[in-house]
Amino acid sequence: MAETLNLEIVNKFTGETFTVEVDPYRLDSLVGALLQVQEQRKALDSLEADLKKILETDHLEQNDYRPLASSLGYDVKYIQSATKTYDQTVVWNHLDHDMLLSSGALSVSNAKLEKLMAELVRKNELATEDSKAIMDSVKTNQRKPYVKLEKVS
């Protein structure tokens, strides 16, 4: 018995409904539906990139991070992100090895290391000179600014 499912996605901007019909018992039906959805996503990602490029080229000034207000309740603005890299040797020299390993601070993310350091500073368990040495070891790499829509509160 062939039973099909109709999965609907509503375009909230136009109100248009996109329907994917699948037979959940047939592998090829599920794979075909997944491929269809992935192609839709690729097309939408491409359209999004094109629209952001137009906003960047025609409406935003280079290196100007002031938001532009739209009448739709969103601001258009550049976001400048950066990655921080800690010198692991410096961190190992100034913090307890067991604590670092148990917290996952160096293997997981910078955020864990920063959270651990903040906690230690709050408890007065990390000397100022140790904290300063670690922070001085940070190398910041700026990424290319990107355009973002932000909902106005």
Image (cartoon, grey):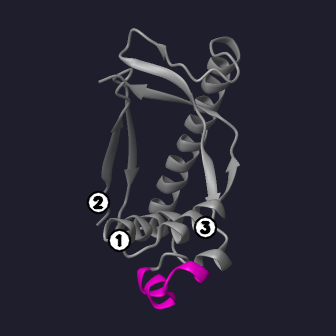
Magenta-colored segment: predominant secondary structure: helix
Frontmost residue, 46 versus 145? 145
* 3 and 2 marks in contact (CB < 8 Å): no
Q: Which mark is residue 99?
A: none
Residue at the (46%, 64%) spot, across then down: 114
Residue at the (45%, 61%) spot, across then down: 30
Q: Which residue is mark 3?
A: 133
Frontmost residue, 6 versus 114? 114
Q: Which residue is mark 2?
A: 3
Q: Earlier in the sequence, mark 3 or mark 2?
A: 2
Residue at the (38%, 72%) spot, across then down: 120
The N terminus is located in which quarter?
bottom left
Q: Which residue is mark 1?
A: 124
Identity of the amino acid at label 2? Answer: Glu
Label 2 secondary element: loop
Assess whether residue 44 is covered by the magenta stretch.
Answer: no
**Residue 28 in the image: above or below residue 151:** below
Identity of the amino acid at label 1? Answer: Asn
